[in-house]
Amino acid sequence: MAIIDSSSVLKVENLRKSFGDKEILKGLSLSVRKGEVKVIIGPSGGGKSTLLQCINFLVVPDEGEVWLEGKKISHGKKRELYAYRQQVGMIFQDFNLFDHLNALENVQIGLVRVKKCDKAEARARALAELQRVGLAEHVLQYPAQLSGGQKQRVSIARALAMDPKVMLLDEPTSALDPELIGEVHAVIKDLVANGMTMLMATHQIGFASALADEIIFMEDGYIVEQGPPAKILLQAECARTREFCAKITKISGDS
Amino acid sequence: MNQAIISFVRRARIGRNNDRHLGDLLGKVFHNMPEGLIAIANALPYMLKGSLVTVGVVIGAMGLGLILGIPLAVGLMFGPGWLRRILSLYVWFFRGVPLLVLLFLFYFGLFALMEINLSAFSAGTIVLGLISSAYQSQIFRGAISSLPQGQLKAARALGMSDSKAIVYIILPQALRLSIPAWSNEYSIILKDSAVTYALGVAEIMARAHFVASRTYQHLPLYLAAGLIYLVLTYMGTRLLRLLEDKVRIPGYSH
């Protein structure tokens, strides 16, 4: 019996996913409350990306349930699925901007084609979101003309324009040159300061610990341990968590 | 060693003989040139009218091929298994049967059987269009599968239905990528259009043949016909290159 926590925006129950005979997610559950920031850490190949993509059904889970604001999502019903995805902002590791559209059009297209806003309204909103991520001067540039950091900021603006109730960020700075990571981190920090609910996978441990209400350590398709950053990073109960955190802290040298 | 020298000498002799033949040939051509030029000059307006017919067939066939080729490609890429099998069968059929057979099959066979009364021009255009749709579907399919997977994922993540994602995100990019291959398809259809002559379509080739069989000026007239095809090929591929430049996404190099 799942007890529905009324304050949780996003709730995931017993998510399972296999590719062939390799089980990637082995029955995962978690929930994120309104305004809460949860960060998923763990080795590559541990299922972080699959988990995030299963949450908005870009990858269809074999088993499990997803709830948004207390409502169970039936992903088989297309209309319900599309409506749900509009409320869940997704940020990809490799940005996935629409290459044939400039920055403004990238942010606008969801408003015009999905939310059916009129053109002028969509344009105003898109401009405001691009300004918010510091790209007011680049609105007419195409993805191929932008740096990686700028591309990721456009993709954040694109997600924000849809007024998401929760955002899923899949290693948003992993594909960036080190000197470009800061500008994207600044934008994400700003979102957190404004109360955005977030579930983020990252390897940037320093950044994670500064932002997160809770850190989830995930490995081999399981959640090994979760708790406040101070506990996970410094006094983890599980030896494997301690080992991973020690390594990653040493390598990243914090940001 | 000896044998080698003998065969060399023999070959040289043959070569000289050939030169003599070539000389005779050129002599004949130049001797007949005034007549040939006159024949071309007389036939040119008539043949150029034929090139309008050719252009009509080619544009019609390319257009039909485009209109059918896009949904074919989308069906082949994103459709359910049963649909993909049916569409593959269609592509296999139109790519596998020779053009001339298809022209006769449809014009004298199918259209007649179905009591559809079509002019040779329409029938030829439709058959060329159906064939082209099979080839164009493969052009578009290749372009679609060359796009990064993330494009479709990002569109879905925004709440777009698959059909919206295909119309607004996938096809605008795939069609741009298709232009070079499309220009290739144009030059192929242009040349294939000459075969519609067999149905009696009054295009370039039919008219060249008509004049040549009456004036006996085969060489100059078919040369002229060939030249018209070359010019049409050049103009078409040139136009498509301009289109390619016009729709190029800024920031991408050649």
Image (cartoon, rainbow, N blue to C red):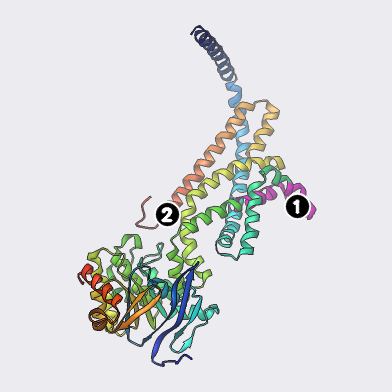
**B99 left or right of B167 in image:** right
Q: Quick one: SS at disc 2?
A: helix
Q: Is residue A83 magenta?
A: no
Disc 2 vs disc 1: Cβ atoms closer than 8 Å? no
User: Earlier along the polypeptide chain: callout 2 or callout 1?
Assistant: 1
**Amino acid type of the residue tagged 1 in the rendering:** Phe
Q: Taking B99 as reference, is A191 above or below it?
A: below
Find residue B246 and name its label: 2
Residue for point 47% across, 81% down: A84
Compared to residue A247, the image places residue A238 above or below, namely below
Q: Position of residue A76 (x, y in %)?
A: 55, 78
Report the disc number at residue B111: 1
Q: Which residues are magenta?
A: B105-133
Q: Secondary structure at mark 1?
A: helix
The one nearer the camera, B95 or A54, is A54
Residue A117 seen from this side: no
Q: Nearer the viewer, residue B163 or A248?
A: A248
Q: Residue B230, image x and y in percent?
A: 53, 37
Query: Around disc 1, counting alpha carbons within 10 Å, would you say few (fewer than 14), some (14 to 19), or many (20 or more)?
Result: some
